[in-house]
Amino acid sequence: MLFDQTILRIPGPTPIPPSVERAMNAPMVGHRSSETSDLIRAIQPKLQPIFGTNQDVVILAGSGTAALEAAVVNAVRPLDEVLVIVTGAFGARFVDICMAYGIRVHQLQVAWGKAIDPKEVIGFLEHHKEISAVFATYCETSTGVLNPVEELAKAIRSVSDGLFIVDGVSCVGGVPAKMDEWGIDLLVTGSQKALMLPAGLAFVAMSNRALKRIQANPNRGFYFDLIKYRTNLENNTTPFTPALSLLFGLEQALNLIEQEGLENVYRRHSLLMDMTRSAFHALQIPLLTSDEDASPTVTAVRPVDFDAEEFRKVLKQEFRMSIAGGQGHLKGDIFRIGHMGYCSPADVLQTIGLVEIALVKVGKPIELGKGVAAAQRIYLERGMK
């Protein structure tokens, strides 16, 4: 075993490209310098296509949860009524944030492993005209579900004037996000997932409709006041100290995405998902989500005849490979494999090969190579050119 080798196949943080690591090692400059303003000016037009917006994308120094909280405190006032669609642990986080600010929360609970049906949202909103905002999670990291946010946006707009606020932390940059076209009012993400950076940057994009609502809110907080960030962006600066090393890395990560081509990035993530899922189908190991509801960035597996935690332990001890366990009531019942950001078909083939060895080690009867062969076939049928 190589003790300084780590194989990271969790749904965040994700591996960092070497060129991004080098960029983050650039000498420090003053955060009010012309160099920093030039950097911010260069980053904005590269971020906008990833969000699918012509609006500025606000960058905060903080984790993805900072972006979630900023969206809540700016867009919703205390005692307002909101609807939170809960399809897993991170939908529940929106509930906790809203309640911390004295917001009255209605919840639409969906079985973990299932995507929300937009018709359910329409039915709820038709009977709750007072809802000022609807919160949803695009990719529910805890279950590997990709919710149909395009259809949700249309459904919400057909019956409600409430803002549509979307947590895109574990998928923006890995799946299509067309915020302006679809009618999303606030879309947020973090740096340590498909954007191929360490944790520490949070991103918020706002529609004109959301911006008007936020400007009318007198209680936007201090650090999370998104109007301050928007105003400062006009001068290519930030209201508070930026995480400069991460911004150096962000510029290079965006260059890599631009070089590959955004549509190719999306196709690669879809390919990685299909390779991973086909391998487990071939090995006859159940997946938590249906193929229709599955996310291109993370796959959740629900074994029935071997222990998920023992399996994870073998991978870590034998190969220093990290995969994620379950959260909430799924803890110990599932494991999750991340395939987003700096991840290639070669990485997936390595992962499935090691998974097969670990399955044998925990006593799961399989035919070695069957999962790898299934993933190989997917690659040969539709692999990258």
Image (cartoon, rainbow, N blue to C red):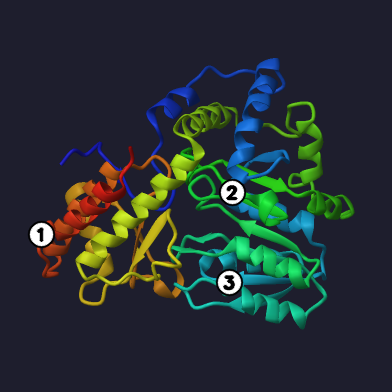
Q: In the drawing, does residue 299 fall left or right of residue 246?
A: left
Residue at left offset 63%, top offset 79%: 120
Tag of residue 86: 3
Which tag is nearer the camera, tag 1 or tag 2?
Answer: 1
**Crowd around label 1: few <14 · some 14–19 · many ≥20 (10 Å):** some
Q: Is residue 56 visible?
A: yes
Lateral position of residue 200 relative to residue 241, left or right: left
Q: Is residue 82 above or below residue 2?
A: below
Judging from the image, what secondary structure is the residue with disc 2 in?
strand
Q: Which residue is mark 2?
A: 189
Q: Earlier in the sequence, mark 1 or mark 2?
A: 2
How dense is the environment of label 2, judged by Cα within 10 Å: few (below 14), some, or many (20 and up)?
many
- Quadrant where the C terminus lies? top left
Q: Secondary structure at mark 1?
A: loop
Looking at the rendered structure, the kind of residue marked 1 is Leu
Question: CA–CA distance between discs 3 and 2?
Answer: 18 Å
Q: Nearer the viewer, residue 248 or 31?
A: 248
Mark 3–mark 2 CB contact (< 8 Å): no
Q: Which mark is residue 368?
A: 1
Q: Is residue 309 rendered to the left or right of residue 209?
A: left
Q: Nearer the viewer, residue 75 or 255?
A: 255
Q: Cα distance, mark 1 to mark 3?
A: 38 Å
